[in-house]
Amino acid sequence: MRDGHPPNRPSPSSGAPLPIRLRKGDGVWIFHYERGAEGRLLARVSELARQADSGLDWVDAALISHEISRRIAANLAAMASDEEEDRL
């Protein structure tokens, strides 16, 4: 592990694009986004969900949205923890 993150995974502060993988049937959707650009990813996923022929539906979009929300919450908790450690 490096900075508390498993190897081969970018740390949230590295600036590297972050992947979100969605397994659907026999396929895998992989979306990449940069920290701070979560809104653009959600807009794109919503656009795909609106298209009947995209293969992505609103349940899939909700799963991706949930994962983004979970990651944001984890990042905020980590930042709060770091700030608490800095005060000690």
Image: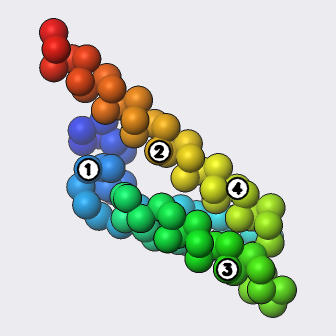
Mark with earlier residue (3, 2): 3
Tag 4 residue: 63
**Residue 3 visible in the current orientation:** yes
For the residues labelled 1 and 3, say whether their Cβ atoms are less than 8 Å apart.
no
User: Rounded to the nearest whole Å, what is the CA distance between mark 1 and mark 2?
Assistant: 12 Å
For the residues labelled 4 and 3, say whether their Cβ atoms are less than 8 Å apart.
no
Tag 3 residue: 47
Mark with earlier residue (4, 3): 3
Q: Residue at x 64, y 49 (%)?
A: 66
Asked which quadrant contains residue 57, the reply is bottom right
- Indicate which label's residue lies in the foreground, 4 or 2: 2
- Indicate which label's residue lies in the foreground, 1 or 2: 2
Badge 3 marks a residue whose secondary structure is helix
Asked which quadrant contains residue 84, the reply is top left
Specify few, some or many for label 2: CA neighbours under 10 Å numbering under 14, 14-19, or 20 or more. some
Badge 2 marks a residue whose secondary structure is helix
Tag 1 residue: 13
Above or below: residue 51 compared with residue 39: below
**Residue 26 visible in the current orientation:** no
User: Rounded to the nearest whole Å, what is the CA distance between mark 4 and mark 3?
Assistant: 15 Å
Q: Residue 51: x percent and y percent?
A: 77, 86
Q: Residue furthest bottom?
A: 53
For the residues labelled 1 and 2, say whether their Cβ atoms are less than 8 Å apart.
no
Mark with earlier residue (4, 2): 4
Name the foreground residue: 77 vs 28. 77
In the picture, measured across the screen, residue 49 lies left or right of residue 33, that is: right
